[in-house]
Image: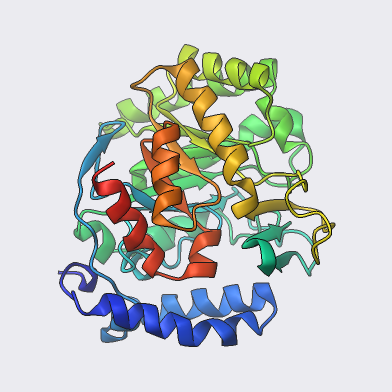
Amino acid sequence: MPAMLHAPRSLPLASLRYGLARPFLFGLDAEAAHDLTLDTLARLQNTPATCLWAQPRVSAPVTVAGLVFPNRVGLAAGLDKNGRCIDGLGAMGFGFIEVGTVTPKPQPGNPKPRLFRLKAANALINRLGFNNDGLEAFVANVQRARSFRAGGGIVGLNIGKNAATPIERAADDYLLGLAGVYPHADYVTVNISSPNTKNLRELQGDAALDALLATLTERRDELADRHGRRVPMFVKIAPDLDDAQIDVVAATLLRHGIDGVVATNTTISRDKVQGLPHADEAGGLSGAPVFEASNRVIVRLRAALGSRFPIIGVGGVLSGADARAKREAGADLVQIYTGLIYKGPALVGEAARALATA
């Protein structure tokens, strides 16, 4: 049995240990700290050393998009782009883990520095640019994960396009990604909303989104027949859409039989962080400043999609109260990323307990 399911004393220890580690990590360059953390998790996962960060997982099962999630709290894509640390991250008590974004071919991403902390705002700005080792390495890493899934955890695989692929050929990359991850995914997320790949957000436009989803759902149905199982497909959208754009996206999702939506990605707005160090850096802003924008999109989506359409809410969750607010806005499930960096693993349990009764 995974350590996260049977170590009730590990919660205060994990919290204390992160409190001790945080000053050291925050003393490093943000991307260096990120890489060190992932390297450590990858090396020590599924060993007795997991007790250094493992926490008991809150059990509050819920069925969304036909999948049984152990609880409503997941890790957002972007932290573990190569799917190396599913078991290590899962030991923190998550009900589901989303890894990626993966592109068909390996790519280095944008030039460094490309990840910045805005400590006063509990925020990050990144312009990483889908840096990853490519589809083949990604799938191999996902296949090696064992303890998280053995304990009932759900794994989502997030796909995108290579930077060198022209936007008019973007569907080709998404088709390769979908076919590659489909046999290994509990659900697949189509990322069309990162601000760090040139022109990517154009795919959220009316005609472009309609064409892309028509192509992807046709391939999804073919893959379902081939593999004998239907894997839910979600679409991840930006927090910077206006109400009319959100309504068009919602209608397009419904028309093509998409299984769910992830709301939202990072924002290009700087309204909430003006004057702070690094606020003028290019890239996507995440953390507390995107909380309200994300909730606005969720509320609008819920009104447009109806009460039963699955929504994963993400953006600015730094407390159990924040997670509950996402749920009240209309999200069925909630993801965290930047909050994990600022608050540590204890946030996972806090959010899951807040949502267990929501």
Quadrant of the rendered structure where residue 145 is? bottom left
Q: Quadrant of the C terminus?
A: top left
Foreground: 207 or 215? 207
Give the residue drawn at x 53%, y 42%.
Answer: 177
Give the residue drawn at x 31%, y 86%.
Answer: 49
The spot of residue 24 in percent (x, y) is 58, 87
Q: Quadrant of the N terminus?
A: bottom left
Q: Is residue 16 left or right of residue 68?
A: right
Question: Can residue 144 be seen from the camera position used here?
Answer: yes
Report the residue that reaches farthest toward the front.
321
Relative height, residue 328 to residue 211 (above, below):
below
Relative height, residue 166 to residue 244 (above, below):
below
The spot of residue 96 in percent (x, y) is 34, 52
Question: Can residue 188 be seen from the camera position used here?
Answer: no
Give the residue drawn at x 72%, y 37%.
Answer: 200
Foreground: 314 or 353? 353
Q: Is residue 358 left or right of residue 268?
A: left
Quadrant of the rendered structure where residue 181 is? top left
The spot of residue 207 in percent (x, y) is 68, 15
Quadrant of the rendered structure where residue 357 is? top left
The spot of residue 104 in percent (x, y) is 59, 48
